[in-house]
Amino acid sequence: MAAEDIGGIWNVKQPGYEDKADIQAALKLFLYGDYNFDTTASSELQKQDLENNSGIARHLQDLSDRLTDQEELGTGSDYLLFDDLATKFPTLEEQIANDGYIVMASDSNGGAVESLYASAFYTNEAPTTDIVDGVLWVDKDSAALDTYVYDSTLLPGDPWVRINDLKNIIAAKGDLLVGTAAEGLDNLTVGANGTVLTADDTQPLGIKWQTPSTYSQPTLGTTAIASGATVTNVNDLTINSTTIPTSKTLVATDSTAYVVPPMSGNAGKYLTNDGSTPSWATISTTPAFVGCSVYGVRSQLMANGSTTYALPFTAQYFDTHNFHSTVTNNTRITIPSGKSGKYQINVQVAYDNASGTPGYLNWFVRIDGSGSYSITTAQLQATTPAGITGSTNNSIVSNSGIISFNEGQYFEILSRTDNGNGNIYATPYVTVTYLGA
């Protein structure tokens, strides 16, 4: 016969609707989930077979297993005669060992069950009922809402222990609570106006209020220096001028005092020095120029379109911050320390075509020995242009731009030509102007 599932959560089996009814087989299928279930096998084997079947017996076995698991965990319940309770749990330790275990005496007559837990009371008088250790009582009509905790071990004496009695230590406004020792506390009375709190291990509390020492304004030695007086030393302070003129001031650096020029007539100026003598100087509103202007001599270029040449700068018109050296790495212009920022770069290169062969040439900026920036290209003339006499200069290529540099970076001007006959000469001119960060 066929077996069909019936039910949802508690699924069991029944014979197929098309089969002939066999009540014995149907009950076996309903109970055990299988027509062939062996009810004569051992309990362990039957339990194993039930795990693979859907029947009432399997669901009952699942419930039984869960109850057993709960009992092994120490939680569960029993319904016993009162005398059986003492047999199962003969000692108090055994009765309380299984947390959550509930036992009901079947022959008891019931009765109210009540548990008391620590809580808090906010009343005018101390509570007298429903009290266990740990109960808090706040005295409602006390000025500072005095708070107590109940401790039954103090009986038959007063079991209420005050826990906020710090206010009794404070006697006046400004008093301080000070530790006297480990777990010790006492009051330090407020000090008089103007006194300061000072550590003093000879005092009972380790600190005290004390009047501060009188402040004395420092003076320049003990000698009064009169106008026009001649002095050489005041309390080990050497004076660089033995005569202090009228209406002048001394200024000290290290152990030497210098005479400052009169302030009269020098309003708006600032005090400076040349390393030995102080003076007043006018504040400049015009920023100082930073930059350089350098140039090179007429130099020959080898005619190879794939070869570039760094143009040397052998002379300079001016150089404010050592941008360039005419001796060391004279093809480089280096950004000085503290001058990172943007720069206006103006470049002009004059070319002489002594070969008489036309072609193209260009120059570009190379930064830190690699890459290129601002490539400029021009046609190389075969002959001197009309109107130019007394020179073989036949091409002048110039350009300008703004480039950002960091201090320590350098750039070069590189040039090349596709003229294959050689005899190409270049004379470079470069002006660099710092624009600011």
Image: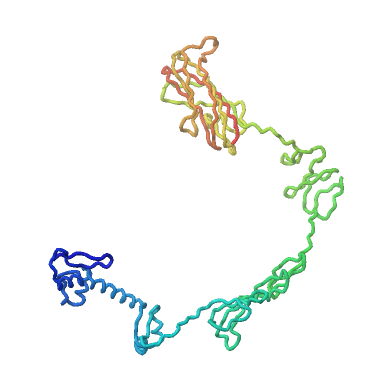
Give how far across and how far down residue 102 sits, in percent. Answer: 38, 80
Compared with 431, 212 (above or below) is: below
The one nearer the camera, 105 or 255, is 105
Compared with 326, 18 (above or below) is: below
Compared with 431, 201 (above or below) is: below
Give how far across and how far down residue 9 sits, in percent. Answer: 28, 66
For the question of whether residue 112 can be seen, the reply is: yes
Could you tell whether 420 is left or right of 35 in the image? right
Residue 389 sits in quarter:
top right
Q: If the image is split into quadrants, where does the N terminus sit? A: bottom left
Give how far across and how far down residue 355 sits, in percent. Answer: 45, 14
Give how far across and how far down residue 427 sits, in percent. Answer: 53, 21
The one nearer the camera, 133 or 302, is 133
Q: If the image is split into quadrants, where does the C terminus sit? A: top right
Kindly identify the residue that appears in the image at 80 percent across and 50 percent down: 233
Residue 13 sits in quarter:
bottom left
